[in-house]
Image (cartoon, rainbow, N blue to C red):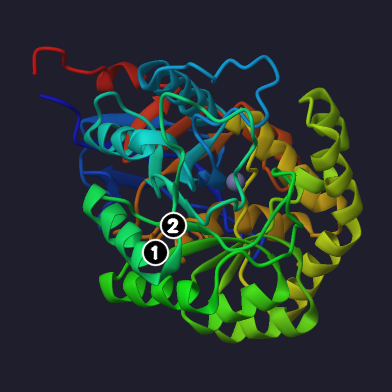
Amino acid sequence: MGIRSVSIRGVSWLDTSSGEHAKRDIVVHGGVIAEQSGESADLTIDASGLTGMYGLWDCHAHVGGLMYDPDAQGYFEAPAARTIRAGVNLAQAARMGITGVRSVGECDDIDLALSRAHEAGVPPGLRLRGSGCALKTTGGHGVAYPREYVRMRGAMTVDGPIEVARAVRHQVSRGAHWIKAALTGGLYSEHETMDGGQFSDEEIEALMTTANQRGIPVAAHCGGSDEAMRFSRLGGRSVEHGYALDEQAAAVMAKASTWLVPTIGVTHDSSFISEDGWPSHAANRAAASIQRHREGLQACLEAGVRIAVGADLNPIGPRLHREMELLEEVGVDRLTVLHAATIGGRELNGLGPESLPEPGAAADLVLTEGSPLDDPKVLRDPALVMAFGRVLKGEGTEHWAPDWKR
Ligand SMILES: [Zn+2]
């Protein structure tokens, strides 16, 4: 019999809404925080002296993504090999305090398969919400000719409202948690601009009408204000990147409760961009977008747009921590960053707005030596990481070893 309940004692919990710390003993039962902290548990962890909070979320990830892949590792890579890389990426991320990942564009439903495996606990892993393949139009964002992967499909190319609707329905049938669509150009592909539209009005309407009818949220790769406003007004859930958002777009997004996942690192992290070997068209476009990208984020913060944190870069663990540092560097205060990176991710993914452990909340937690508010670096190597109520790192990990007899 596996462990069903875990008692965690002595932790000082950081409330990322207020910046206050609160001592609270909790019991985790069946993956959620239990009503009664006093009830006996199968396992008791004395965590006196540690600080706790909800785990981090990378809300814009490509779990097996290779970006520009200068050594062509992915060119003939088989789905099995990519799946293994994605799994290792997620395992490392979990050890670095990330308990949730939203995958927005991945080949062959690798993310959806890993999501189901982790939720079932075989093997135990972080919480993964995925879109499977992204939707793009012909010649649209995501083309990196000639380096198309030949053995698997990373995106669905759709033209016209009928194909768009069919693709959304297909993704729903695959078990996708999100629909991802590339509404504008970006940095990656050569023959586009980072804010130029790539879906027609009819295509965006088909996308949103079909997704809304099926009750599935849509995340839009979206650089420009016009598309961000159209998408938000039709019920779009999250604008990704927002390279060139103006105040008007920010106001529309705030009114429509559309989130922003700014992925500030893809324009601001110039040392990573050069190390990663981006081609000149992308590196130049990134550098040229820095100012507008930053101003768009500021406009959204001022308008009250909710923010979640996503790195869009691999490996997920190190890159998400870097994204959080960069957000501070562009002027977002630390508490806002910590809240966006934890509770923002939970709320965007339907796990509720609680910022302290409350009964019924999903038990995705990290415990650190020292408070992340004093030094966020403590989150890079937490003392304990828990997702779905299972300990992924730290005391008690052995209790969730997969049962290979099944
Ligand atoms: Zn992306």
Query: Is residue 376 left or right of 160 when viewed as pictured?
Result: right
Q: Decide: marks 2, 1 in contact (CB < 8 A)? A: yes
Name the residue beneath numbered marker 2.
158
Q: Secondary structure at mark 1?
A: helix
Query: Is residue 214 left or right of 99 when viewed as pictured?
Result: left
In percent of width and height, residue 227 lies at: 63, 74
Residue at screen point 70% across, 43% down: 188
On the question of residue 323 being in view, the answer is yes
Quadrant occupied by the N terminus: top left
Q: Is residue 256 above or below residue 107?
A: below
In percent of width and height, residue 338 lies at: 65, 52
Frontmost residue, 270 versus 191: 191
Q: Secondary structure at mark 2?
A: loop
Name the residue beneath numbered marker 1.
164
Pointer 1 local density, CA inside 10 Å: few below 14, some 14–19, many at least 20? many
Query: Is residue 52 left or right of 18 when viewed as pictured?
Result: left
In percent of width and height, residue 88 lies at: 47, 20
Query: Is residue 282 left or right of 107 when viewed as pictured?
Result: right
